[in-house]
Image (spheres, rainbow, N blue to C red):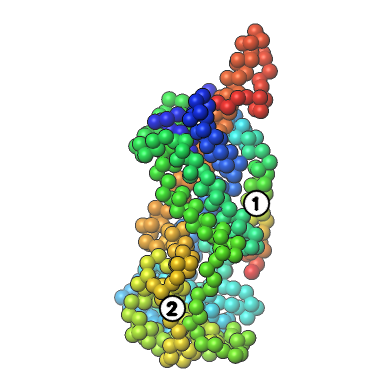
Amino acid sequence: MTAPRDAWKVAWRGMGWWRWLCLALVIVAFVLLPQEFAR
Amino acid sequence: MPPGPPSPAPAAATPEKGGRRVWFDLHSWVGLKLCVLMAFVCFTGTLAVFSHEIDWALHDEMRVSPVPERASWGAMVGAVQQAYPAWTINGLAAPKGPRSAVMASMKTDEGRLRFVWVDPYRGTVTGDTHWFNTQRFLRNTHRHLMMPVKFGVPIVSALAIALLVTLVTSLVIYRHWWRGFFSMPRPERQRRFWGDVHRLAGVWSLWFIALIAATGVWYLVESLGGGAGGQSDVLAERADDAATVQAAPAITPAAIDLAIANARQQWPGLDVKRIALSARGIVIEGQAEAWLVRDRANALGFDSTGGTVTGRRAGTGLDVHHRISEMADPLHFGTFGGLATQLIWFVFGLLLTALSVTGAYLYGLRVADAMRAAARKAAKRAGTRTARPPAEHETVHP
């Protein structure tokens, strides 16, 4: 039986470069947070 | 959604099954590649359904205890002006519930935005809070990832296309999906169990996915220039518009009460939700006869004395383009039916987030199983148990 951790690893690898693009967009939201807060 | 108990995933044998394989691969590809962003946007949107309630719980200033009497809108504006004489009032918003305070949007003397809260029963100021609250955090994160709106909104709303693709493909690959509403997850194997969970959540969420995808596509169209444009102005033109902000305090509490009295007389069905103040006059907005519209769809404009009506805008008189624009927010946010619809939107928002996560997990289980099976086969062929497991790209589709 596949361990959940292995399944997640395979899924993560399967996302290819898209995972970095998606992750970068999510991180951008938090990087820009102080700028929004200062308005 | 991959196919469910009534019809398992196709094995690309017959042309019919091979056709479904393509739809399955498309569903899987779109869902997996965008899983991280999709889950994040869905989750922030889900929390945003109750963002006001979260703020209400976090800030003492927003909480009030009801009594039978209510203060007038004019008295509340007077209280705000007295408590913060150097700040400018842009407008007042009605409380969201019987235990919530009225929110006054203010600009400080340094030009910063703040919210001042007023007890609607006693007409007293309860305090002020930062403009950037939970509601603003969740809205800006969900709507445009805190990026400039012109970039952020198209990026986020383009996910609606991915949502539509997964919706349409799921209906093709999940044969007899309408029989799946009561197919309980089978606990025998984890891949089967999570597949059943994914299908069950998906089949119950079909209407919600369609709704969120449709409104999302509208936001995409709007962000790319296909919006309905502004509402008709209900205030009289004024030559010296540059002085708008400075002249706003000139509107007296008595003028506001007069405007409210006139509005009730001229439009008895108007439930006042917001008052906007400027040097050009007073705008009273709210809900009236039209269903599923934003408060701004119904508006009465008055001059600064509150005695003369300068314009009227009704949600019932909108053209199709403006009607779609007005309907999008109430449908997307789930706020049109109060706490009951908010709760429904929250639960289905969680299901949508879960679909994204379980879909990726299922892919992992499926491919890991296939890799192990291929490794076993290779080991058998080589006559040894220590054969190299094949790389992911070497495996056939399970």
Q: Which residue is mark 2?
A: B313
Of circles 1 and 2, the one toward us is: 2
Residue B259 showing in the rendered view: yes
How far across and how far down the image is residue B310, in percent? 46, 87
Do the residues bearing badges 1 and 2 touch, measured as CB atoms within 8 Å?
A: no
State how far apart marks 1 and 2 are (Cα).
39 Å
- Identify the image quadrant of residue B87: bottom right
Quadrant the C terminus of chain B occupies: top right
**Label 2: chain?**
B
Q: Are marks 1 and 2 on the same chain?
A: no
Residue at position x 66%, y 24% from top?
A: B394
**Residue B125: image x %, image y %?**
47, 77
Q: Is residue B18 above or below residue B117?
A: above
Q: Label 2 is placed on what type of residue?
A: Arg
Q: Out of B79 and A39, give the one closest to the viewer.
A: A39
Q: Which mark is residue A25?
A: 1
